[in-house]
Amino acid sequence: MIDCIFGKGLAAKWRILAVAIGLIITARPDLAQVKTEVPPVVPVAKHVFVKHIKIYGEALKGNLEGEAVNRDAIVFLPPSYYKDKNRRYPVVYALHGFSIGAEQWTHEIHVPQTIEGAFAKGSHQMIVVLPDSKTAYGGSMYSSSVTTGNFERYIYHDVVNYMDSHYRTIPKRLSRGLVGHSMGGYGAIRIGMQHPDVFGSLYVMSACCLSPMRSRPMNPARRKAMESQEKELESVKAPADVAGLPFFARAMLASAAAWSPDPKNPPLYLDLPWKNGVRQPDVIAKWTANAPLAMIDQYIGNLRRYHAIALDVGDQDGLRFDMIKLHQILDNYGIANSFEIYHGTHTSHVAFRFQNHVIPSFSRNLCATKNCK
């Protein structure tokens, strides 16, 4: 993932890498994830009910990184939930991006306002849940790792089972939708193509990390940059030490913890794709194995099972090239999918898209009756 997006010059490397992990680094990187156009309030919109809960992750037990097993989640119940007590609802699982958690994700997509707006504009009522998968380094990559825990299973099994047992859901795959943005988009396609028995419709927004890392010799500038980054990481003796690290270092640690865990390499229990300035082919191969564009051909049969697959990305988003490739692969295999390149950056229209495209897409495609097959 990392090397395939490097541009010329160290500044370009930092900026483009940041996009690949899920952020657009500007002069104020701390504000990048919340710069999004907010659609106007729909005057007739009815309020949804917001529940802040904890969901226990059996799949996360024993993780070497010390990540919390009992995790935050935010549930949005439709306006009719407490009035029509015999009614059951489809559920949308919405996955956040890198460096933010469920609470920050609510501000980026401006829920509950955008959910309420979608319902008011004609979308069928549904439950929306935002599980939190932020880790010590900024993100789980929604992957399975002894270091971070199995966040993939946490989403498709632990969170789904909790929702089905605690709320009036329609507990069938055709009534479950999975959506994510950036790292969450990566999670949506990664989890989606492996678990069509759980979800019936997918929506992938500006997914990061789709392409594998390219293995090639490092020029002197790249080697110097890698050596500098190695020195930064030498100060990290435990996950709690990352607070002062720059974005690049945290992104590398998060990716390594997810894709190249090493239970025999304390204290961080991970392997980086270089050591002493030398690329590590075995580690790079592990990262490649976790790149959706590298493994998608194995899951074509699974992807054919989806009732609907939607993809979108901004025309000013560096991730659009890989999103185009994902769309083309689906097209080449004859798998129906909607794809839109809209005018915007990585984060500029996420809230607008969530209200006017994501929720309506699931409204059209999720089964909203008890008779779903």
Image (cartoon, rainbow, N blue to C red):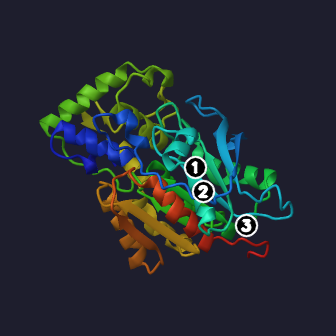
In space, the residues marked 1 and 3 are separated at their CA atoms by: 25 Å
Q: Which residue is mark 2?
A: 115
Is 92 rendered above or below residue 261? below
* Residue depicted at x 43% and y 24%: 242
Which label sits on residue 172?
Answer: 3
The quarter holding residue 90 reads bottom right
- Left or right for 27, reference 198: left
- Determine the secondary structure under disc 1: loop
Is 355 rendered above or below residue 236? below
* Residue depicted at x 43% and y 78%: 333
Q: Give the residue furthest to the left.
A: 220
| Residue 36: percent from left, percent from top | 42, 48
| Residue 262: percent from left, percent from top | 48, 35
Residue type pointed to by label 3: Lys
Asked if one can make out residue 65 in the rendered structure from this viewpoint, the answer is yes
- Left or right for 50, reference 190: right
In space, the residues marked 2 and 1 are separated at their CA atoms by: 6 Å
Q: Which residue is mark 1?
A: 111
Q: Give the residue furthest to the front.
A: 43
Mark 1 vs mark 3: in front? 1
- Determine the secondary structure under disc 3: loop
Residue type pointed to by label 2: Ile
